[in-house]
Image: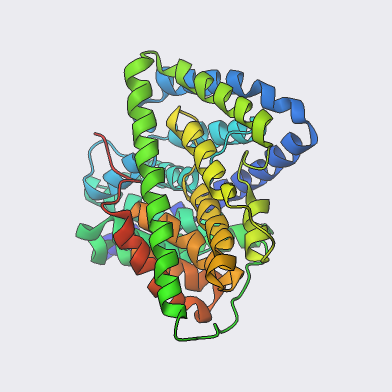
Amino acid sequence: MLARLRVLLFAAIGGALTGLISYSFLKGLDWATRTRVAHGWLLWLLPVVGLVVGAVYFYWGGHAKGGTPYVIEQGHIFTHGVPARMAPLIWGGSVAGHLAGASVGREGAALQMAGSVTDTAARLGGLSDAERRTLIAASLAGGWGGVFGVPFTGIAFTLQMTPKHRLRALAPAAVSAFVAAWVVDLLGYDMGVRPHLPAPNWTIGLPCKLLLAGVSFGLVARVFVGSLHRVKAKLGHWVKWPPARPIIGAAATIGLAVLVGRDYLGLSTPLLADAFADAHIDWYDPLLKLVFTVIALGTGFVGGEVLPLFVIGGTLGGALAPGLHVSGPLLATTGSVAAFSSAAGVALTGLVLTVEQFGWNSLLPAVLVGVAAHFAAGKPGLYVTHH
């Protein structure tokens, strides 16, 4: 009994620390984005940022180089724990990348920071390896609760990512997720208004259209994951010194930005907002966002995969809606989540996330879209570990 209470106490401590670092991270990303938009010349510093981030990770990263898959792995099978250095490395690397225009997200960074600060507290507290493993699993929920304000989604993600320890991790995950979300809210960070879907107009053809759209989201998720792994593998073979790889990615990003514009740099949340608002979305928007993100993450820039996948899925939904004669916001909202959940193989998490963000009217459409996307995506590979 005392051992369980101790784990819950450290889950709360980890959640509070995750909330604090998530708040600072969100404010840092907001500052970086505003600054980059106001000073367009910062894009030309992307090769320098890439070299510095690549060198820091290569020479001093240690196990932090494993990224989100490493944190998830430690929640499965505890070996070394999550290093304390992972939190400042991913914080600094992500904010610097956003400042110069790298097309990376934030949720993956949040999971790494949450695992790092939670396990560091547990290690300093003298907890056992089994307790630390449970707390690392629970920290995944804290990362979602802190950076995205969706604690129920975080709990579902933890349960899906650590299936062997579900019962043990459930209560600590709930504590971590809600404490992290509460701390960020208490500090006053505004997550923005998420559209609540009205009840869909169910016609005979709508289920078929949703299934068809779901297949499209799953296929684009498959292309994203396959391309990401392929770019990483090819660069690893061709460029033996890892710090040089982000320089190549930076050059490609700058070249593309000169050709097609800067809408696809950074988080690209304005594109997602347009899709949610039923504004016109060009067919090439999701494809270009996919290319920019694969280049950034595949060449060694650090950050998250989740929000870019939201943008890819959301803009794809917005682009498909007119041709399918379906509500744009309906396909944009369900598609934004389906692209991520099918890429990661977490269909239940996607369902919870859709409802938590967009309301109960999205439940049945999310089921149809999510199931079709899950099967179309095939074997998931977003968080495959390489250790």
The x, y position of residue 20, in whole percent, is 57, 50
Q: How is the image coloured?
A: rainbow
Of the pair 119 and 29, the residue shown nearer to us: 29
**Res 70 visible:** yes
Residue situated in front as seen by the camera: 289 or 15: 289
Q: Nearer the viewer, residue 309 or 353?
A: 309
| Foreground of the two, 229 or 172 | 229
Taking the image as shown, residue 305 lies to the left or right of residue 94, namely: left
**Residue 258: % across, % down:** 68, 29
Question: In this rendering, does residue 135 appear at all?
Answer: no
Residue 134 picture location, percent across and down: 29, 54
Is the N terminus in the top left, top right, bottom left or bottom right quadrant? bottom left
Quarter of the rendering occupied by the C terminus: top left
Horizontal relation, residue 330 to residue 164: left or right: right
Which residue is pictured at 74% across the width and 41% down the height? 34
Q: How many labels were placed on the picture? A: 0
The residue depicted at 61 percent of the width and 75 percent of the height is 196
Q: Residue at x 42, y 35 (%)?
A: 84
Q: Is residue 230 above or below residue 124?
A: above
Q: Quadrant of residue 210?
A: bottom left
* Residue 193 percent coordinates (x, y): 67, 66
Q: Where 222 falls versus 341 (above or below)?
A: above
Residue that extends furthest to the right in the rendered view of this protein: 38
Instruction: State left or right for residue 34 relative to residue 362.
Output: right
